[in-house]
Amino acid sequence: MCPIDILVKLGIIEHLHIGQNCTPEEVAALTTLFKEFCDIFNWSYEEMEGIDPSIIIHEIKTYLDVKPVRQKLRPVHPQKMTTIRAEVEKLLKAGIIYPVPLTEWVSNIV
């Protein structure tokens, strides 16, 4: 399905992808809805200020007697690396994630 372009702010266009199973009437109705109410949606992490981090925090619960296992670092395709780096920078800037000092065990970014 082709993306729907929504003018969010002057010079800023967001591309929305609506489900493949939608009928043309549903796509037209959703397009109208998104265009009419584009000012109430958060289009970036910077616009999500004041959100309680507890609703987006991810924890890996483990048993107390289990020893963590260090896995080998998985390589990332070079073309994806710049996209991943940009996304991580956005999350850092918005305060959704934060750096952790050196520890015995950490996981790769998932």
Image: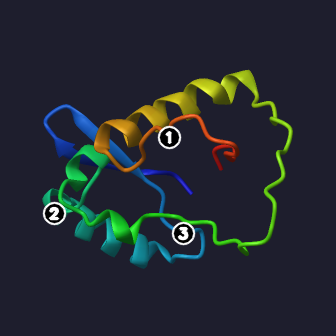
Q: Within 10 Å of the Cα at label 1, are there few (<14), some (14-19), or many (20+) other Cα atoms?
A: few
Amino acid of disc 1: Val
Q: Is residue 83 left or right of residue 11?
A: right
Front residue of 67/36: it is 67
Say which residue appears at 81% left-offset and 60% top-offset: 67
Q: CA distance from mark 1 to mark 2?
A: 33 Å
Quadrant the N terminus occupies: bottom right
- Where residue 28 appears, as percent x and y from the top left, is 35, 70
Say which residue appears at 42% left-offset and 47% top-offset: 97
CB atoms of marks 1 and 2 within 8 Å: no
User: SS class of the residue under badge 3?
Assistant: loop
- Where residue 11 appears, as percent x and y from the top left, is 19, 31
User: Label 1: which residue?
Assistant: 100
Front residue of 23/17: it is 17
Amino acid of disc 3: Gly
Mark closest to the chain's N terminus, 3 or 1: 3
Q: Within 10 Å of the Cα at label 2, are there few (<14), some (14-19), or many (20+) other Cα atoms?
A: few
Amino acid of disc 2: Ile
* Res. 92 in view: yes
**Does residue 41 sit above or below 99 in this rendering?**
below
- Where residue 20 appears, as percent x and y from the top left, is 59, 68
Q: Is residue 76 left or right of residue 110?
A: right
- Where residue 83 appears, as percent x and y from the top left, is 56, 31
User: SS class of the residue under badge 2?
Assistant: helix
Say which residue appears at 32% left-offset and 75% top-offset: 29
User: Label 2: which residue?
Assistant: 40
Q: Within 10 Å of the Cα at label 3, are there few (<14), some (14-19), or many (20+) other Cα atoms?
A: few
Mark closest to the chain's N terminus, 1 or 2: 2
Q: Which mark is residue 19?
A: 3
Q: CA distance from mark 3 to mark 1?
A: 37 Å
* Res. 44 in view: no
Query: Image quarter for residue 98?
Result: top left
